[in-house]
Image (tube, rainbow, N blue to C red):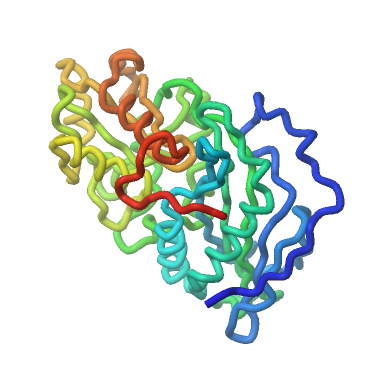
Amino acid sequence: MAISIKISKTSQSRIHLCDFENIEFGKIFSDHMFRVDYEDGKWQNPQILPYGPIEISPALSAIHYGQSIFEGMKAFKNPAGEAQLFRPIDNINRLNKSAVRMGMPEIPEELFLGGLKQLVAIDKDWIPTKEGSALYVRPFMFATDDYVGVRSSINYTFMIFCCPVNSYYPKPIKVKVEKKYVRASAGMAGYAKAAGNYGISMLPTAEAKKEGYDQIIWTDGRTHENVEESGTTNLFFVMEDKLILTPRIDGNILEGITRASCIHLLKEEGYEIQERDISVKEIIEATKANKLTDAFGTGTAAIIAKIAAIGFEGTDYFLPEAESRKVSNWLYNTIYQIQTGKIADQNNWVMPVE
């Protein structure tokens, strides 16, 4: 079913103000945004309009009670200069899974995809082509009732905006194993991309950064014995360049789309993958014995974030130099080349915009 979207283009593009060689992640936004509102029990009035502030009430339900979810995805240009998306249907499905968990309405696939593709097509010139760059796309939904009362909102807004970005982590990162704070536990909403899941990470991450770390590794909320995910990525650990471990999907961690892509590619390449509980002790002992040959995070923003060192109980355990990492280097190059159309997409992950 074709979706009719009202389009109001900006009278003056801001693209000339963007230095595509030096972009600070998440600070520069393209010319337009997509918006559709959920009122009277249905999604209505989809429109693309110039990027800019939106008017909200001080009593906005999302501010007071946290009904706010989002996604992260990217658009790229292939060698012919055509815009394309990477696994957008998976993002739609995950956003709707988050919506259900947070008591919010699901958004129809054709509405999400129709707005997304038209928005990216209109702002196609904002897609950077520098190595490691992309147009980051942020779909999000929030409750819009003008009401202070603890209940699910009746009204919602779904929007998408875009920003050109360079690499999220330009160099390997130091991470600290977090054993004080808890991100999620059984029965909570750890698998949802809910804003609150990121809000509760701000203090622990800030404390870790004061100690010289870039990110934290969350551990399970019951015992703090098993690793779960990083603040911005899913986690992978490589034993002697052969066995690859990643925490199992148990409701506490995000079902990463880049994570799923990595698992698929690694299995195709013949690697042994184990999705299971992984103890902090196992990782530290493997590092001490020089058996941990690679460790990295996966996510839309970073694609692959190589881990340089793991901090645990006051000691930093260093991993091999980034240039020697067989698995993470291969994964990054493979995924990025699929995303940018430089190698064949054998899994139908790439969706043309035009």
Image quarter hosting the C terminus: bottom right
Q: Is residue 117 left or right of residue 235?
A: right
Where residue 327 sits in the image (x, y, percent)?
26, 27
Q: Residue furthest bottom?
A: 40
Q: In this picture, is 154 found above or below 302?
A: below
Farthest residue, direction front: 80
Residue 7 percent across, percent down from the top left: 74, 65
- Please tell me which residue lies in front, 244 or 20: 20
Is residue 285 among the parts visible in the rendering? Answer: no
In front: 44, or 154? 44
As drawn, 220 above or below 336: below
Count of marks overlaid on the render: 0
Q: Is residue 295 left or right of residue 30?
A: left
Q: Residue at x 70, y 44 (%)?
A: 29
Residue positioned 68% across, 49% down in the render: 123
Name the residue nearer the viewer: 59 or 331: 331
Give how far across and how far down residue 274 sits, in percent.
15, 42
Which residue is at a point 45% across and 43% down the rendered structure image?
300
Question: Residue at point 51% right, 35% down?
Answer: 79
Q: Say which quarter of the image contains residue 18.
A: top right
User: Could you tell whether 67 is left or right of 102 in the image?
Assistant: right
